[in-house]
Image: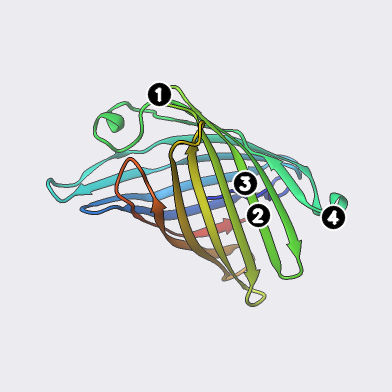
């Protein structure tokens, strides 16, 4: 899902996601494949994250363009645990930047460096789990934005979980906002391999046409 959760892999464990990610506004496809989302547990409450991948952009009026997309570095700190405090809570600061400016010039990534500072919360009520997130996005180019999201998930079986999500961005003065609805799933093939995916659509996008969004990948845990 777009909204992050407070969970961490555990001390010395890897949780790596390899996926195809797409965005499809009218007359355009943007596909990141493979997207590498690498996570390492440094202790039981810290998660180190690296995310990057090549992007393919295809517009109806010209041929495909390819190149490296944005790179993201993040550190998650889960400072509250549900078994002790009644809920999970974490901070997940993230830096988003471009290794090569050619990707910006070709429309494959956004200009500038951005910093996300979100707070994530998760609380279980039997088989139902609620996961809100709120924070700020600061950029060297353009205005700062609020970020927010809410995920509700439930277990269908011991191996399968389904989720629904609302996720959005808003200008700091709340004058404009983007909002997307998303539906996702997790299915365990084994203790070390999980099928993860989501499909959604933007409900509001004031500066551009609304788009279909999707994520299909596998999570490797070891």
**In the image, is residue 206 above or below residue 105?**
below
Spot occupied by residue 166 in the image (x, y as percentages of width and height): 53, 55
Point out residue 222 in the picture as x, y percentages from the top left corner.
Answer: 63, 55
Discs 4/3, front: 3
Location of mark 3 (residue): 133
Residue at screen point 70% across, 42% down: 90
Q: Distance from label 2 to label 4 (Cα)?
A: 16 Å
Q: CA distance from mark 3 to mark 2?
A: 7 Å
Mark 2 = which residue?
131
Which SS class for mark 4? helix
Residue 175 or 123: which is nearer the viewer?
175
Badge 2 element: strand
Q: In 3D space, how far apart are the residues under numbered discs 4 and 3 (Cα atoms)? A: 20 Å
Mark 3 or mark 1: which comes first in sequence? 3
Q: Looking at the picture, how far across and down is residue 87, in whole percent?
A: 78, 52
Q: Residues within 10 Å of mark 3 (few under 14, many from 20)?
A: many
Residue under numbered circle 4: 83
Most distant residue in the bottom direction: 157
- As drawn, the residue found furthest toward the left would be 61
Residue placed at 69% from the left, 67% from the top? Answer: 128
Residue 11 in view here: no
In the rendered structure, which disc, 2 or 4, sits on the residue that comes first in sequence?
Answer: 4
**Residue at left 46%, top 47%?**
36
Contact (CB < 8 A) between labels 3 and 2? yes
Q: Secondary structure at mark 1?
A: loop
| Residue that mark 1 sits on | 141
Q: Is residue 6 above or below residue 170?
A: below
């Amino acid at each position: 899902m777009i909204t992050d959760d407070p969970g961490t892999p555990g001390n010395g464990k890897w949780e790596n996601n390899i996926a195809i990610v797409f965005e499809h506004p009218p007359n355009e496809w943007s596909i990141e494949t493979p997207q590498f989302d690498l996570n390492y547990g440094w202790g039981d409450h810290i998660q180190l994250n690296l995310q990057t991948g090549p992007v393919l952009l295809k517009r109806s009026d010209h041929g495909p363009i390819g190149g490296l997309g944005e790179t993201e570095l993040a550190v998650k700190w889960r400072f509250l645990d549900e078994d002790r405090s009644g809920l999970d809570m974490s901070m997940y600061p993230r830096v988003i930047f471009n290794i090569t400016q050619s990707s910006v010039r070709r429309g494959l990534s956004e200009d500038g460096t951005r910093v996300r500072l979100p707070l994530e919360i998760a609380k279980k009520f039997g088989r139902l789990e609620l996961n809100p997130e709120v924070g700020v996005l600061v950029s060297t180019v353009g205005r700062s934005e609020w970020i927010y999201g809410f995920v509700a998930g439930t277990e269908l079986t011991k191996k399968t979980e389904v989720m629904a999500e609302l996720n959005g961005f808003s200008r700091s003065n709340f004058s404009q906002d983007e909002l997307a609805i998303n539906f996702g799933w997790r299915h365990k093939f084994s203790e070390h391999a999980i099928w993860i995916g989501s499909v959604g659509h933007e409900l509001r996008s004031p500066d551009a046409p609304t788009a279909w969004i999707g994520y299909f990948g596998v999570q490797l845990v070891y």
